[in-house]
Image (cartoon, coloured by chain):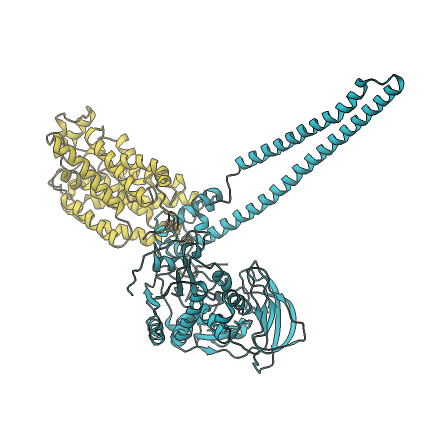
Amino acid sequence: MIARLFKFHGGVAPEGHKDESAGTPIRRAPLPSRLVVPLRQSPRTTARCCVEVGQKVLKGQRIGEAEGGFGTAVHAPTSGTVVDFAPYPMAHPSGLPTRCVVIEPDGEERWIERTPFDIDAAGRDAALAWLRDCGVVGLGGAAFPSHVKLGSSGGVDTLILNGAECEPWITCDDRLMRERAAEVLAGARILFRLIGARELLIGIEDNKPEAIAAMRAAARDAGDEASILPVPALYPMGGEKQLIRALTGIEIPYGRFGAEYGVQCFNVGTAHAAWRAIVHGEPLVDRIVTLTGNVAHAGNWEVLIGTPIDELLALAGPAADTDRWLMGGPMMGFALPRLDVPVIKACNCIIAASPTLMPPPPPEQPCIRCGECARACPAELQPFELYWFSRARNFDKARDYHLFDCIECGCCAYVCPSHIPLVDYYRFAKSEIVARERDRNAADQARERFEFRNFRQDREKEEKAARFAAKAAETRARAAGEATAETPAAGAPAAASPGDAADKKKALIAAALARAQAQKAAAAAHDTEDPAP
Amino acid sequence: MIHSPYIRKPASVQRVMGLVLLALLPGIAAYAHTVGAGILVNLGIATCTALAAEALVLALRKRPVAIALSDLSAVLSAWLVVLCFPPIAPWWLTMLGVTVAIVIAKQLYGGLGQNPFNPAMVAYCAMIVAYPALMSQWPPAGGMDFGTQLGLILGGARDIDGLTGATALDALRTGLHAGAGPVDVLRQGPAFGFLGGSGWEWIALGYLAGGLFLLAARVITWHMPAAFIATLSLVSGLFWLVDPARFASPLFHLASGGAMLAAFFIVTDPVSGATTPRGKLIFAAGVALVAWTIRNFGAYPEGIAFGVLLMNLCVPLIDMKTQPRVFGHRGGRR
Ligand code: SF4
Ligand code: SF4
């Protein structure tokens, strides 16, 4: 099959630094002294702990139940004893703690009973639930639950397997494809089947000829018709939207998902994890991590989730002048604020950085509007405009210029001759906008509550007054009736009074509602910050 | 703490400006060879003036001086000022022009990256308004010996006999209108444009070579030069075809050194120009249109500078109206 590739705008080609770690086979990291397995998986979901301190667990035993639509299960990465269940610091720029199950390995690596899953017999929905309960999430870095991605059944024609691995230094997907091509392909076919696609495209950057060859050989051996497509090594080719664009020409705007456009994209590591879960009944308890940079022994390690990073780093032999450790690649990763944090499912690479390897950027200079950043931006934004607006705290304007379409890939900052940390400005502007949005929503709610309370109090007051009036009239009427002979007219005021009151009440309610409406309209007019893009 | 990206392309403002200066060298060499080495003296004066003025203002503004000076942007502005001025402009005129460019057009607006107007063009316009006579005295087409040039640059008294520029100047003073006799004189005389008339083609070629180098080095994009040259050719060609007696040919317009300098080095100034691809086309085409109009119908021999300033004013609007589409918006491109 001859496929035409599409170009995406911009992109940069930093030095790859792949050779440092790509040459050696994947090794299994030794069992650490303890495993700290976080139950919190994303800002949205935390698994519910289902073990107790002191309990013995087997490798692959579920320790956290999936909760909510986006939740996935969490498993014991090895056999041993649960020794703690408490908040521990995380590998996150903030370093904030989250609830973790701490397991002391018994060194025996005893598995639970592993039963392969039979998709034919159980059906698609059960298979998705199985993947969820096996804790399968995207291993490309986002850790998005795979069953959710697969859940959008119908209409997905094209399944894309992402083996681009465009960030410098990272080689875990490269090694995986080289060494386990058949498994990756089989996993892709499982995902393919579950999503009901008609076409399987595998995109691999052309700086990985061995991986391409291995995948092609595996496809040939399996008689598989998947298209294995070398794509130009151009960062951020591995960005989901960029790869989809390169392979299919389809552009997915901000805030939309591939499934809406008939394509879905999975990382090669995810395919491998799905294969293990379905074919071997093994939940996701480890992943491949590239350890590289300023180290003596760069390479790829198969690491149990929960392994403390400081124990892992010892395997690589960091050089003395290492001053930082980056998690992820140098373009989009972050410097670990501390090292006593566990490896998580999203952790694809740890890089030792030194002042010579990754020198601090030269001092920031004024923007000369040279447009280099715009030429490099894969989202086709005008980064310098966003920068001017963000800097001037002109957030509405920044949003008008599509700030939220920015994928924070760092291409603009990479090329900027004035060394402006552009992405920092965008992060700042985005968080400010989100915070203001939240404040405003809260204020809106408070205002609505306040208005309603006023309205209710007014209403109650009016009702009370009406009741009093009615009662007074009644009393008067009664008094009058007692004093004089009964006339038909005497009852009339008494009867009219409640009717008047009801009308009055209605009018008051209408007025209060109109007032509330007018206030809301005024607020909306002030409000140039609709959340709609 | 430093955030991602942790790696940077080896790029700097200094490198960008340095490449532009480098690209000017062929044109300058041709200039010095054809017209005389006086230009080099003025370049030297201008460079020193620019650095001194920039340093002084930065010190007054309490900004780091060394970094700003080493970015070479002041030197570039100074060179462009000199290349627009007559090569025999007296030293104080050069200094004044450069000071206007650096202090008023650049630093008063906030320094590098903040100026809405092209500094060199501000200097040119200010000086041609203030000193129309001096700004219109060009050496004759055959060149002028260095000694005479040096005397004119450094000396006080100016003997402008034999300077054809005086003729053009007279024409300007009496109010120039297309179709009047002096146009022919002007067209042949060197007062046309920043430079002009016969014998200046080599300089234009030098600028062209430098411009192509900048394109190859990806310092500038094709949009501005292409739109400028195309528009200038188109409009001058159209009128020339209709009435060759009244209007100069496109080739004449292009070969006047000012046009090539403008196409590759002046309209392409990133700070004060339009930034979007379509905006660049509009901007450069606008400059060319205004330049041609003023050259033919205006009160000043050179229109490029006014064209640039006028279009500088329009930049915010142009940029706003020509924002390119964003990835994913308006659907996929097949
Ligand atoms: S690359 Fe840097 S200097 Fe150039 S326009 Fe963008 S932000 Fe400004
Ligand atoms: S970080 Fe944002 S603005 Fe910068 S290149 Fe990437 S997408 Fe464009």
Residue B91 vertical position relative to residue A471 in the rendered view, above or below: below
What is the count of numbered marks?
Answer: 0
Would you identify the image quadrant in which residue B275 lies? top left
Q: Position of residue B240 (x, y in %)?
A: 13, 33
**Above or below, comparing residue B132 to residue A218 in the picture:** above
Q: Quadrant of residue B173?
A: top left
Question: Residue A426, position in %: x, y?
Answer: 46, 51
Task: Return the residue found at the far right.
Answer: A483
Q: In the shown orientation, is residue B248 left or right of residue A399?
A: left
- Asked whether residue A291 is in view, the answer is yes
Residue plotted at (67% across, 72% down): A52
Q: Residue at x 37, y 38 (%)?
A: B316
| Quarter location, residue B96 | top left
Q: Colour of chain A?
A: cyan
Residue A21 seen anywhere in this rendered image of the structure: no
Which residue is depicted at the point 33% across and 37% down? B312
**Closer to the camera in the image, A520 or A355:** A520
Image coordinates of residue A62 in percent, x first then y, are 59, 71
Q: Considering depth in this image, is B127 or A506 the residue closer to the camera?
A: A506
Q: Which chain is yellow?
A: B
Q: Using residue A186 as the reference point, say whether residue B72 is left or right of it.
A: left
Q: Nearer the viewer, residue B311 or A47?
A: A47
Q: Nearer the viewer, residue A161 or B170?
A: A161
Asked if residue A124 lies left or right of residue B158, the reply is right
- Residue occupying image coordinates x 56% and y 81%: A109
Residue A61 image offset from top left, x and y in percent: 59, 74
